[in-house]
Amino acid sequence: MANPSEVISVLVVLEFVVMASLVLLLVPFEAAVPLVPLLLVFLVALHAYRA
């Protein structure tokens, strides 16, 4: 079973990924560009955690 702090960290990362994805869909791309690098890092981290 996962440690509680690990679960909280994964939920925070998942929340950021979902919110950043929604921002990328709703606002012009030029305004959302600063979120893209962190979004990619968190997506890779979630993929590594899941594997």
Image (tube, rainbow, N blue to C red):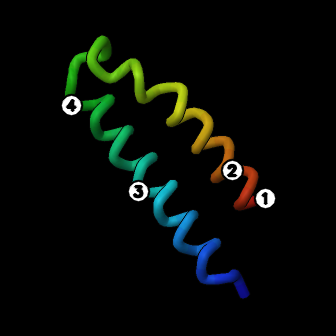
Q: Which residue lies furthest to the front in this view?
A: 5
Disc 1 crowd, CA 10 A, few/some/many (<14, 14-19, 20+): few
For the residues carrying marks 4 and 3, which lies nearer the camera in this image?
3
For the residues carrying marks 3 and 2, which lies nearer the camera in this image?
3
Of marks 4 and 3, which one's residue comes earlier in the chain?
Answer: 3
**Distance of label 1 from label 3 (alpha carbons):** 19 Å
Residue drawn at the location 58% of the way across and 74% of the way down: 7
Under circle 4, the secondary element is: helix
Of marks 3 and 2, which one's residue comes earlier in the chain?
Answer: 3
Q: Which amino acid is tagged 3?
A: Glu
Residue drawn at the location 32% of the way across and 29% of the way down: 24
Residue drawn at the location 27% of the way across and 18% of the way down: 31
Q: Name the residue under label 2.
A: 47
Under circle 2, the secondary element is: helix
Disc 2 crowd, CA 10 A, few/some/many (<14, 14-19, 20+): few
- Res. 51 mark: 1
Q: Residue furthest bottom?
A: 1
Residue drawn at the location 75% of the way across and 52% of the way down: 48
Q: Name the residue under label 3.
A: 15
Q: Which amino acid is tagged 4?
A: Leu
Q: In this view, does 1 lie above or below 8?
A: below
Of marks 4 and 1, which one's residue comes earlier in the chain?
Answer: 4
Disc 4 crowd, CA 10 A, few/some/many (<14, 14-19, 20+): few
Q: Name the residue under label 4.
A: 26
Q: Nearer the viewer, residue 34 or 49?
A: 34
Q: In this view, does 32 lie above or below 51?
A: above
- Res. 43 mark: none
